[in-house]
Amino acid sequence: MGKGKIRKFEEMKTFDNVFQPSFEEVFGKDYMLKNKWAGEHFKNNHPIILELGCGKGEYTLGLAGIFPEKNFIGIDIKGARIWTGARQAHKEKILNVAFIRTRIELINSFFGENEVDEIWLTFPDPQLKKRWKKKRLTAAFFLNLYRDFLKDPGLIHLKTDNAVLYQYTLDLVKVNALPLVFSTDDLYGSSQSEMVYGIRTYYEQQFIEKGLNIHYLKFELPRDKVITE
């Protein structure tokens, strides 16, 4: 591991907005803040919104600035990426932002029933190889995990440059008769681009400059719907 990463990991240990439990602490176990994020960490009863696979936390921070009356938690396994957003939030005293370093597969160890209002998936890995399809963050496996802690019905936002992931998710929504709020295969060419609040990540801007369309999907996830592939 490079010296830069080591420095970032050490610095993150001093941030009160970053949580980095070990695998052993949460595998098959409830994390200490499960069902307590609003009251014990954020010290309020505001809605909680997650960004899964948050990377540097650009969307987490962007949404937190627009909606100070809501709490935002970015989740990613890459600590060196999280450091960027966590450091900014710590330095600027952005109190409605937190970050968790963990695998998304373990997310139910962190959140309890009705604890989360919405989930944002911003440019997740499309997992294009057929055998990896179940690893997509919009796969039935993950949607069924999200159902356990989302308020009923919870909202899912997908923003991606990948047409395969977009179409796969749209098909899954239709097959499972999930309420579709909005979908477009050309977000910035549509009349509804304001739905993403003008927030663009670093990589998103690169995609746009390359002429790639940005796809966006927003749908509801009712608790009583068991999702199938």
Image (tube, rainbow, N blue to C red):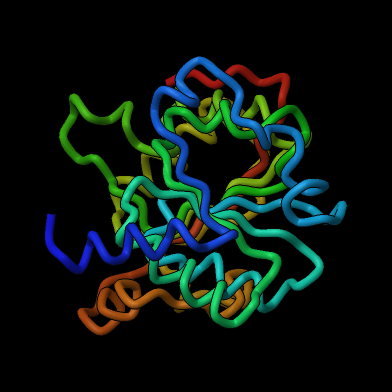
Between 10 and 208, the residue placed more toward the observer is 10
Residue 94 found in image quarter: bottom right
- Residue at left 72%, top 19%? 224
Give the left or right position of residue 98, taking residue 161 as reference.
right
- Residue at left 35%, top 59%? 10
In the rendered view, tell whether residue 78 sits above or below residue 114: below
Q: Position of residue 83 (x, y in %)?
A: 39, 65
Between 159 and 71, the residue placed more toward the observer is 71
Residue 92 found in image quarter: bottom right
Q: Position of residue 112 (x, y in %)?
A: 70, 29
Residue farthest left in this picture: 2
In the rendered view, tell whether residue 174 sits above or below residue 41: above
Q: Position of residue 126 (x, y in %)?
A: 28, 46
Give the left or right position of residue 44, taking residue 33 as reference.
right
Residue 148 found in image quarter: top right
Q: Quadrant of the N terminus?
A: bottom left
Residue 138 in sight from this viewpoint: yes
- Residue at left 47%, top 32%? 172
How many marks overall?
0
Q: Quadrant of the C terminus?
A: top left
Between 221 and 22, the residue placed more toward the observer is 22
- Residue at left 29%, top 55%? 162
Residue 153 in sight from this viewpoint: no
Between 9 and 202, the residue placed more toward the observer is 9
